[in-house]
Every structure is written in C-alpha cells, then in structure tokens.
Image: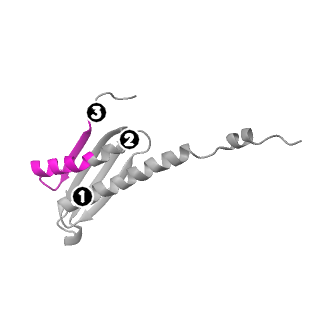
Amino acid sequence: MNRQNNTQEVIVSGIHLELTPSLKTFVQDKSERLFRHQERIIRVRVELECDSKQAVAQRFTAKGHIQIFGPDMNASVSSDECHKAVAMLIDKLDRMLERRSHMVKAKRQHVRVTDLEAAAPETM
C-alpha cells in the first residue's frame, strides 16, 4: 500500500499536562526529523506526562510510539523540562529508525545459503 500523498500524522497528547499550541508545534517540528528515514511511517504518537510526585529530575516523561509497517517502535524518556524530554525522545526514536534501516540494508546484502550452493562448482 503505497501512499501518494505525503501526509504525516503526528498525534500529541498530554497526561496531567495542559498542551499549549507552542508545545504542540515544537513536537511537530521536531518529529519532522523522523519522517526522513522511513517513508512508510503510518503514524507518530507522542504522549507528554507530568508527574508532580516524582523527583524533580524525572518530573516530565515523554513517550513515543511509531506505527510503521512491521513491528511498532516505542520509547520513553524522563527529564526535568518538557521541551528537553521531547528533544531527547526524538533523538532516541531517530537512532532507533536509523538502526532499523541499517539492519534492513545489511539483511539485503547478506549472502544466503542457496546463493553459495549455486556459486560453488560441483566436485565429484
């Protein structure tokens, strides 16, 4: 299923946190980086959570879910500031997508047993 239009769906939700328009645009601007790796990303969902009972260094948690053809990717990051947590989350998801694309390329170039049997001459 190849989509012709390049609409990228980014869903931002807040848990115990009021989402401001600037925070939403910050998340959407940062998430543009993820779409350069895989053109087959269906949806990116970012959940921002503020837990006032946690320690100050882990007060804000950003969770990211990437729905992609194949296994979905999930990541979570905690920080003392919401914007910092979002930036760290996008970096983490970016590294995960990069690793996945390298693994796909390496798998494509891997020599298979049937290729080795066909290349080897029969000795008898």
Choose mark 3 or mark 2, whichever is in front.
Answer: 3
Q: Secondary structure at mark 1?
A: helix
Magenta range: 6-32
What residue lies at 54% left-to-right and 43% top-to-bottom? Answer: 108
Name the mark on residue 41. Answer: none
Q: Which residue is mark 3?
A: 6
* Residue 7 on the magenta segment: yes
* Mark 2 touches mark 1? (CB < 8 Å): no
What residue lies at 69% left-to-right and 40% top-to-bottom? Answer: 114
* Residue 30 on the magenta segment: yes
Give how far apart the Cα atoms at labels 3 and 1 are. 24 Å
Tell whether 118 sits left or right of 70. right
Q: Which residue is mark 2?
A: 68
Where residue 62 appears, as percent x and y from the top left, is 25, 57
Name the mark on residue 87. Answer: 1
Tell whether 45 sits left or right of 67. left
Q: Is residue 20 visible?
A: no
